[in-house]
Image: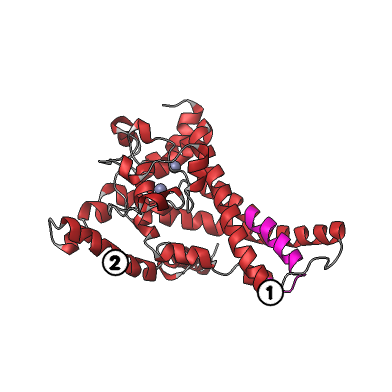
């Protein structure tokens, strides 16, 4: 392997990390961070115990041990993304293509033909709702299947949270999550491509989903943070608020396996896993005292799932 190859690879890794703040499809896109600022200020105004800067950027939250584990995972996962996940996206497009082909064969060509506008609207709504439901089911499995929980613990071992904690994910979970998203994307894109009689290129489908954009614009990055942004009570039955996701990270046993939804709270409501912000007072994040010690470093988080499965506790 030449020095040039290594350098190009490292540059790609850096790009993947940098994309987290430079790409509108990411929750930590710098513009979404800025649009969250007025919300943070509004919440700060209500308590106002310290300076705004101290409230916004507490050292422990951004530079503490738990935060560094987040950053190490972001760096490590950039390698996983380039080597293992990028090739999966090609599979997503192939799946979309074959789905359209099969539908053409089974139902005939251009039997139903939606306009480009109706396709985009139906596709956006369809992918948002169906995609969110698949995400809920995968997340539920991560909590309920012991083998998967071993890997998901990495995300829950964060004892402080800042917006980048969203990417504190074990590589095995990262692969499973992406497989789910790519399968959903491939199937839904194939179906809607058929319904629009292949008028729209699949790259259009891969563009930023309007719904996701709106969701990210309104403080979605505050879910992983110390800022307690709740929604009006009735809204928390429909959409997961930042505080509801913080409850999901609580170390109290009565909060375990609750608020598993990503954007919509309706799945939690339907399946009885919903807790609203007003039901909870104080929150501590993490796995509980004993487990927090076992998952304090990057290496512990990376290797413990394998050790536990092999019985090396
Ligand atoms: Zn979880
Ligand atoms: Zn989380």
Q: Where is residue 284 in the image (x, y as percent from the top left)?
A: 28, 40
Left/right of residue 94 with respect to residue 272 in the rendered view: right
Local crowd size for mark 2, using a 10 Å CA cut-off: few (<14), some (14–19), many (≥20): some
Q: Mark 2 points at which residue?
A: 37
Q: Is residue 113 left or right of residue 127?
A: right
Residue at image coords 33%, 69%: 34
**Secondary structure mainly formed by the magenta segment:** helix
Q: Identify the mark at residue 53; answer none if there is no mark.
A: none
Percent of width and height locating residue 128: 56, 58
Looking at this view, is 34 or 303 the one in front?
34
Which dot, 2 or 1, sits closer to the camera? Answer: 1
Q: Mark 1 points at which residue?
A: 116
Q: Is residue 42 left or right of residue 210?
A: left
Q: Quadrant of residue 192?
A: bottom right
The answer to whether any part of residue 295 appears in the image is yes
Residue at (51%, 49%) from the top-left corner? 174
In the image shown, does 157 or 201 lie closer to the viewer? 201
Q: At 40% across and 59% down in the image, what residue appears?
A: 220
For the rendered model, the colour scheme is secondary structure
Assign the N terminus to one quadrant of the image.
bottom right
In this picture, residue 83 sits left or right of residue 191: left
Q: What stretch is highlighted in magenta?
A: 184-201
Which quarter of the rendering shows the C terminus? top left
Q: Where is residue 116 in the image (x, y as percent from the top left)?
A: 68, 74
Residue count near mark 1 (Cα–Cα under 10 Å), binned few <14, some 14–19, many ≥20:
some
* Rendered position, 77 above or below 136: below
Under circle 2, the secondary element is helix
Whether residue 57 can be seen here: no
């Amino acid at each position: 392997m030449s020095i040039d190859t290594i350098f190009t690879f490292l540059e790609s890794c850096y790009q993947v990390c940098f994309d987290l703040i430079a790409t509108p499809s990411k929750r930590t896109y710098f513009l979404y961070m800025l649009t969250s600022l007025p919300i943070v200020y509004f919440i700060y105004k209500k308590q106002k115990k310290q300076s705004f800067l101290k409230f916004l950027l507490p050292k422990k939250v951004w530079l503490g041990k738990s935060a560094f584990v987040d950053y190490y995972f972001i760096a490590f996962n950039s390698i996983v993304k380039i080597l293992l996940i990028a090739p999966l996206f090609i599979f997503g497009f192939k799946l979309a293509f074959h789905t359209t082909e099969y539908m053409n064969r089974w139902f005939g060509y251009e039997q139903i033909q939606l306009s480009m506008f109706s396709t985009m609207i139906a596709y956006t709504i369809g992918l948002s709702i169906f995609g969110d439901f698949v995400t809920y089911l995968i997340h539920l499995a991560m909590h309920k299947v012991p083998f998967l929980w071993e890997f998901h613990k990495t995300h829950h071992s964060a004892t402080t949270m800042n917006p980048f904690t969203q990417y504190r994910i074990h590589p095995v979970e990262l692969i499973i999550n992406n497989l789910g998203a790519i399968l959903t994307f491939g199937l839904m894109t194939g179906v809607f491509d058929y319904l629009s009689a292949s008028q729209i290129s699949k790259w259009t489908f891969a563009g930023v989903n309007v719904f996701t954009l709106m969701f990210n614009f309104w403080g979605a990055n505050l879910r992983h943070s110390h800022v307690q942004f709740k929604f009006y009570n009735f809204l928390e039955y429909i959409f997961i608020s930042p505080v509801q996701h913080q409850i999901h990270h609580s170390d109290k046993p009565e909060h375990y396996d609750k608020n598993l939804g990503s954007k919509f709270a309706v799945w939690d409501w339907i399946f009885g896993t919903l807790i609203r912000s007003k039901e909870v007072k104080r929150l501590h994040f993490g796995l509980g005292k004993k487990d927090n010690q076992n998952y304090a470093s990057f290496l512990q988080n990376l290797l413990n799932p394998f050790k536990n499965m092999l019985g090396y506790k």
